[in-house]
C-alpha cells in the first residue's frame, strides 16, 4: 500500500487518502477499528463500492473468496457490532467469519 495522507480530525482507524489510478479513496484499517494488533506485513487494500462511493479497506491479505450460506449467518447484537460495522457471524466449514456491513463502514469513513 502506498502511504496514506492523514485526514485532520479523523480517528486512527481511518488511515487517510490514497491515490488509486488517479482517484482519491479513503482507506479504513479494520484491525485498528476492531482493536486488534496489525500483522507485521504492510497489508493490501481491498477496494469496495458502497452507495456509489469507493472505499479502501486495509487487510492483511485475502485468504479465499467464499459464498456464505444464508442459513448459517447469525445476526450480531448491537453491543457486539463494533459500532454497527459487524452485521453477522458466519460459519464456513470449521472457520468462524465476521461479516462486515460495508455500507455502515462507508458511512463512518466517508464523513472525513
Image (cartoon, grey):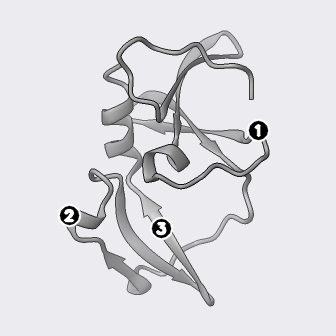
Where 76 falls versus 94 (above or below)? above
What percent of the width, then of the height, locates residue 73? 39, 79
Residue at 45% across, 53% down: 34
Left or right: 8 in relation to 43: left
Q: Nearer the viewer, residue 100 or 50?
A: 100
Which numbered marker is on residue 54? none
Q: Which of 84 and 64 is in front in this view?
A: 84
- Residue farthest left in this picture: 78
SS of the residue at dot 3? Answer: strand
What percent of the width, then of the height, locates residue 82? 33, 55
| Contact check, label 2 and label 3, Cβ < 8 Å | no
Task: Indicate which disc, 2 or 3, sits on the residue closer to the N terminus.
Answer: 2
Identify the residue under disc 3.
98
Q: In which quarter of the image is residue 64?
A: bottom right
Q: In which quarter of the image is residue 7?
A: top left
Characterize the local packing of mark 1: few (<14), some (14-19) or many (20 or more) Cα atoms within 10 angstroms: few
Nearer to us: label 1 or label 2: 1
Residue at 74% across, 63% down: 63
Which numbered marker is on residue 42? 1
SS of the residue at dot 1? Answer: loop
What percent of the width, then of the height, locates residue 4? 63, 19
SS of the residue at dot 2? Answer: helix
Question: What is the spatial separation of the Cα atoms under label 3 and label 1, in whole angstroms?
Answer: 22 Å
Task: Indicate which disc, 1 or 2, sits on the residue closer to the N terminus.
Answer: 1
Residue at 31% across, 44% down: 104
- Residue farthest right in this picture: 41
Task: Indicate which disc, 3 or 1, sits on the residue closer to the N terminus.
Answer: 1
Left or right: 19 in relation to 79: right
Residue at 53% across, 55% down: 36
Nearer to us: label 3 or label 1: 1
Identify the residue under disc 2.
78
Mark count: 3
Amino acid at each position: 500500500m502506498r502511504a496514506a495522507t492523514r485526514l485532520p480530525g479523523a480517528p486512527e482507524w481511518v488511515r487517510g487518502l490514497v491515490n488509486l489510478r488517479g482517484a482519491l479513496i479513503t482507506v479504513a484499517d479494520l484491525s485498528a477499528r476492531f482493536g486488534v494488533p496489525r500483522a507485521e506485513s504492510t497489508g493490501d487494500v481491498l477496494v469496495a463500492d458502497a452507495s456509489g462511493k469507493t472505499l479502501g479497506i486495509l487487510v492483511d491479505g485475502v485468504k479465499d473468496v467464499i459464498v456464505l450460506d444464508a442459513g448459517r449467518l447469525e445476526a450480531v447484537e448491537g453491543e457486539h457490532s463494533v459500532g454497527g460495522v459487524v452485521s453477522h457471524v458466519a460459519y464456513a466449514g470449521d472457520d468462524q467469519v465476521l461479516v462486515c456491513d460495508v455500507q455502515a463502514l462507508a458511512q463512518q469513513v466517508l464523513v472525513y
